[in-house]
Image (spheres, rainbow, N blue to C red):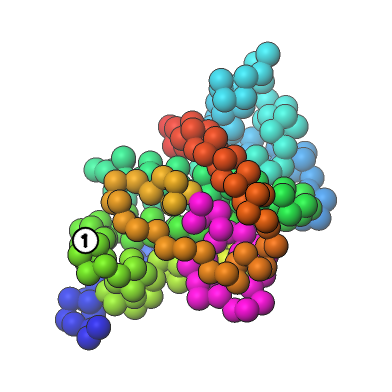
Amino acid sequence: MVVDAEALVIRKRLEQSLKELPPLPTAVAKVLDETNKTEPDLHRIDEIISGDQALASKVLRIVNSAYYGLSRQVTSVGQAVMILGIQQVRTITLSVGSIAAFSSKNPVDPEGARRFWEHSFATAAACQTIGHKLGVDKKSLETLSTIGILHDIGRMFIFCNFKSVYDKMVQKALKQGVSYEEIEAHFLGDNHAGIGAMIAEKWGLPEQIVHSIRWHEGPFEPTVDRALATLHLADWMHKHLYYGDDKAPVGGIDPVIYEALGLSDEVLEQIQEQVRKKVAEASQLYGMVAA
């Protein structure tokens, strides 16, 4: 496609919006730093979260919700961290921080934002399900959960900052029968995966997370790493089952992905069934984190 004047103007606006993107809240960044360590200090995580009243309030609200069904009320962040575990605390903290970074930009379409984040939470759950089937270690499961939550932050950024452009791109993709990524690249100079990687880099996230976000839509090298392959499969599974109102066709999986993961058809069916069950949970978790 020829780059027209409209696309050039949008690209300039995009560049400026990325420059103005706020960093992750300090408490969120500190929790991520601590949970990235080989042996995270639970007491330190308690201190960080307790020092941020809004974050502490959300963690306590979530741990005391019907979602966890505990028999007694949890009154301290330290108790919550012990009950939830590192992975869940990291997920909640990162979700709160990233939702806060985008939600104020487009308050007129909460339903659209809800669909985005539910897809992100469901993808994270699917990443963990696939990771369990692959027998990956606990630390790798935490990383898979993180990249699942953040894989589409580039698309969320476009949606929040350029809503009319986003809607136009969706319609063009549907009308022309081409991928969203191709239309995004024309208007924005890169697709949502590349933009998401820029955001992750600006937030100082680990290189593996940046890399997985950047390439989750492909194309893939013959020796694609397992984290990226897991993310792509998890993303595809949720889109394939619950794509939303657009009714856009979802392409197939690159054979390279299946080869990298080495999962049989039977195991893939088991994973897909578990992903179906995780969708309702993703909706509940978004409702609590975004409240």
Could you tell me which secondary element the residue under label 1 belongs to? Answer: helix
Q: Is residue 198 left or right of residue 17?
A: right
Q: Quadrant of residue 45?
A: top right
The stretch drawn in magenta includes residue 227: yes
Mark 1 is surrounded, within 10 Å at the Cα level, by few (under 14), some (14 to 19) or many (20 or more) other residues, namely some
The residue under the point 45% across, 58% down is 152
Q: Quadrant of the C terminus?
A: top left
Q: Nearer the viewer, residue 249 or 58?
A: 249
Q: Is residue 242 visible?
A: yes
Q: Quadrant of the N terminus?
A: bottom left
Q: Is residue 231 above or below residue 280?
A: below
The stretch drawn in magenta includes residue 121: no
The residue under the point 35% across, 58% down is 249
Identified by mark 1, the residue type is Gln
Q: Is residue 267 left or right of residue 188?
A: right
From the image, tell me which residue sits under label 1: 171
Q: Is residue 173 above or below residue 30?
A: below
Give coordinates of residue 61: x percent, y percent.
Answer: 55, 26
Q: Is residue 25 visible?
A: no
Which residue in the rendered view is the most extreme toward the bottom? 2
Q: Quadrant of residue 184?
A: bottom left
Task: Write down the region rendered in magenta.
Answer: 214-237
Q: Is residue 185 left or right of residue 232?
A: left
Q: Nearer the viewer, residue 182 or 9?
A: 182
Give coordinates of residue 48: x percent, y percent.
Answer: 66, 42
The residue under the point 54% across, 35% down is 277
Q: Is residue 140 left or right of residue 120?
A: right
Which residue in the rendered view is the most extreme toward the right? 39
Q: Is residue 205 above or below residue 50?
A: below
Give coordinates of residue 9: x percent, y percent.
Answer: 21, 76
